[in-house]
Image (cartoon, rainbow, N blue to C red):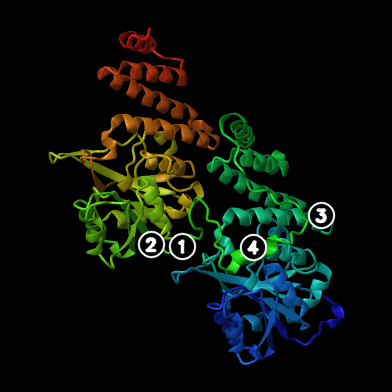
Amino acid sequence: MNCASVTRNGRVSVVIPTYNRADTLPRAINSVLAQSVADRCDIVVVDDGSTDNTASVVAGFNGRVRYLWQPNSGAGAARNTGLRAVHNEFTALLDSDDWWQPDKTQRQIDAMRRWPQAVFVSGLSLKSFPDGTFAAPQPPAIDRDRATDIAARLFERNFVPTPTIMLRTAVLTETGLFRPHLRRSQDYDLWVRLACRGPVVYLDHHLATFAVDAQHSLSMDEPSQVRYTVQALHLLRRELRRRPDCRAAWRRGMARNLTWLRDRAYRDHDYAAAARYALLALRHGPRERARWEWGLCIDAAARAVFSHPRRPSVPLLLSSAPSSRSAPAAHRSLSGNTPARTSNRGAAGTHGNGRVTVVIPTYNRAHLLPRAIQSVLNQTAADACDIVIVDDGSRDSTPEVAATYNGAITYIRRLNGGLAAARNTGLRASRNEFAAFLDDDDEWEPTKIEHQLGVLRNWPDVVFTAGRAFGRFTDGGLKQRPIPDMPLDQPADFAPHLFRENFLSVPMLLVRRRYIDEVGLFYAGLRRIEDYHLWARLACRGPGVYTDAHVATYDADTPGALSRDWYAMMRAEIRARRLLEAELIRRPDCRRLWRDGLVRAHAIIRDRAFSERRYALAARHGLLSLAASPYGRKRWEWSYPVQALLRCGLA
């Protein structure tokens, strides 16, 4: 861009790149035309090779919009095409699915005039979700309504959404335009380069609204977004020559993003990637890392080499060389027909709307399902509940039963895949702030949701809350589920108790959805005890509250229930505990309790098999119990496997 071509005329060039967004583009353009100083705005729409009717949509604005077309080259290249075509004093950027507040341009021009040293002006924004709800991102802790240096803060994290920006066009001559080979985070890269060259004004005023969770949005693929943020930070290390005072902030930003990638890869059992990210994170500030982080790195490396087959992983993308073939594909993912790759945790962007997603999986239980649904509809806080019924391939009259609740529930039918997969399907279908689970043979007390919502609102840092549950038997009797020795009606650490034994059942809990997104959904590889596996992972992320209130009743001996097969249940518990060993890196204080629980599970199978004269099975699990913890065992426990072997004729 030629600095001499920029005119100090007080006008604003608005660059809007688009690709196959003819449905949302008019809203973006109209938000510019509705500005209080719209007569000072020149709109440039850059069509990045759209295959829809984008051109005719722009033509409908009767010459009020300048239209540029280019072959599909990616979002960064499209923005650069627009920037090269403008010569006004100021430039603002707007994506085709976002929109401005009517006074945005006037406020930012006034700020530019008041602080002539400012390189750009930004401000507060709102997130818009597909269901029509909104959320305000956490604003940064910086000075507002004055020129301030935000470079160090930006190196740590990006808090400047693209539609909130207005910049001085002439400054781009020094910083350069967007880096088109960065498939994502091009805007973040440019904001940091600008902030390294001068102060910024952050207005304490709502300027724009940007869409999240939109179909085909780049933000849907969070791991890729974080990887490209790391690549952008790698390129931005060159700016540290200009701003050596920001080196510590740059290291913190790198470590934070690499740590996120490390934990995600570890949860996905991609141990080779987890070890690589762990080493890179330790490289940036090794003295500040906790001891368990070094242990996690070693553990991941050992698992990658000895325990698990190598899995192909996405490269870290630290190369600064442009790729001529990657940019078009990236922009198609931004706004075209190629869907973004979704993560194992489900779609990102949980709404802070105070609502509860109630997931009820069912399979051939048409006669029991109405009781479960009605117990949700009878809630005193039923208006805050969104019921999702997931039919896991039933062959009875379940679809007809669900149809009688048309309008009150969301009904999803899927091929039979087990409880974990069915619950995950229900979770992905709704993005509310809270999640609760109810099996088709269980029911809730009328005040459960109201009471538990009050608990989570009273303690914002609590991950989940549970209450008392009673098991109902076919003879009409009730038995309360045992409670461990722990504080009631106040935040408490559930992890030690859960590593010892599972005392939670599905209908007892109400969970903050964002923590499920953090730890991952139910593990579909477990056909039983998948709920216990999730509860323990959640408990490792923060406290819970166990309330002294009856919240649910569950059928303890339903015919055909998975829990009736004791051996399969105990094998599943052992497998779940083996999977939970990964969480001990985060909670090393629970290792002894985890081992005690594993010993107990093997011992239960040993004793039950011995009583049923299944001596080979008793001997095997007796030996596994001793191997898990050989010290401090009683003499009879060592003789038990020998007796079992003698009785089955193997010794």
What residue is shown with label 4? 330
Q: Earlier in the sequence, mark 2 or mark 3?
A: 3
- The one nearer the camera, 330 or 93, is 330
What residue is shown with label 1? 351
Say which of marks 2 and 3 sits in front. Answer: 2
The kind of residue tagged 4 is Ala
Question: Marks 3 and 4, how far apart in space?
Answer: 33 Å
Give how far across and how far down residue 64 sits, in percent: 64, 90
Question: Marks 2 and 4, how far apart in space?
Answer: 34 Å
Image position of 380 (left or right of 276): left
Give how far across and how far down residue 111 sits, in percent: 70, 79
Say which of marks 3 and 4 sits in front. Answer: 4
What residue is shown with label 3? 244
Question: Marks 1 and 3, how far apart in space?
Answer: 39 Å
Question: Marks 2 and 3, how far apart in space?
Answer: 46 Å
Q: Earlier in the sequence, mark 2 or mark 4?
A: 4
Image position of 537 (left or right of 310): left
For mark 4, give the secondary structure: helix
Q: Is residue 575 above or below residue 397?
A: above
Q: Earlier in the sequence, mark 4 or mark 1?
A: 4
